[in-house]
Image: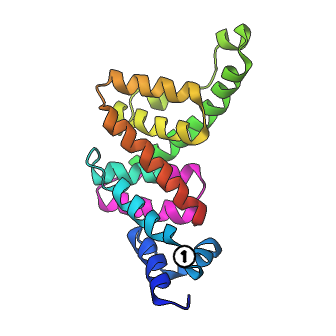
Amino acid sequence: MFGIASTTDNALALLTEIGLTEENITGQLRVLAQTDSRYLKDLKINVTNSLNAGTFTKKEAYLLAYAVAVNEKNEVLQKAFGAFAEKEGASDKELAEIISCTSLLNANNVYYRFRHFMHDEFYNNTQAGIRMSIMANPLLGKEFFELVSLAVSALNGCELCVTSHEKTLIGHGTAKQRIHDAIRLTAVIKSLAVLL
């Protein structure tokens, strides 16, 4: 299909890494494969390394990747990472909680970015009025819920939310390496979403 075996191998190896097939090759992947782009090999290594960080269980890694896919509205990756998470024991309720957390953080990120941009006492002191009951007793645990919240906030570029969630994670005793690995995984899956 791509003209040279090595280019096909790189594109298919990347897809296979995340449980996809040649049917999922997009125009962007096709361009990279046809030009024998070294980036495909790099991205496959990045995906493999970030999903296999020693600071996560497999289930946690796939749930974080699933949150990125949900945030980026990438149905192909949602299906792939949702299936991987389920194979690692994630329940429908846990997947639903990831979707809920991602949606809630999108609201929070817009709201708190606005407050941060305005530097206005009125906005800073006014109650948000955004209901967040799912944060009180998350099914996946408070620490992991905060980790997902941090990842989504980083994706959406909310400085106030990122610093708040990082501080809360440190308060939970989360190692900085785990936080770093979560953000690296988030960045890599975001870069993958661009191609799929």
- Residue 168 appears in the figure: yes
Per the rendered image, the range of residues in magenta is 68-92
Position of the N terminus, as image quadrant, is: bottom right
Q: Is residue 45 left or right of residue 123?
A: left
Residue located at (58% from left, 65% from top): 195
- Report if residue 85 lies within the magenta region: yes
Looking at the magenta stretch, what is its main secondary structure? Answer: helix
* Residue 159, horizontal then vertical, whole percent: 58, 28
* Residue 164, horizontal then vertical, whole percent: 49, 23
- Residue 141 appears in the figure: no
Mark 1 secondary-structure assignment = helix
* Residue 75, horizontal then vertical, whole percent: 56, 62
- Report if residue 57 lies within the magenta region: no
Q: Which residue is mark 1?
A: 24
Residue located at (64% from left, 20% from top): 129
Q: Is residue 107 left or right of residue 77?
A: right
171 or 37: nearer the viewer: 37
Q: Is residue 34 above or below residue 81?
A: below
Q: Where, by quadrant of the figure, is residue 126 drawn? A: top right
Kindly identify the amino acid type of the residue bearing the numbered disc 1. Asn
Residue located at (40% from left, 43% from top): 182
Q: Is residue 66 left or right of residue 141?
A: right
The scheme the figure's colours follow is rainbow
Position of the C terminus, as image quadrant, is: bottom right
Q: Where, by quadrant of the figure, is residue 193 drawn? A: bottom right
26 or 93: nearer the viewer: 26
Q: Is residue 25 left or right of residue 182?
A: right
Q: Is residue 110 above or below residue 52?
A: above
* Residue 147, horizontal then vertical, whole percent: 41, 36
Label 1: how many Cα within 10 Å (few below 14, some 14–19, many 20+): few
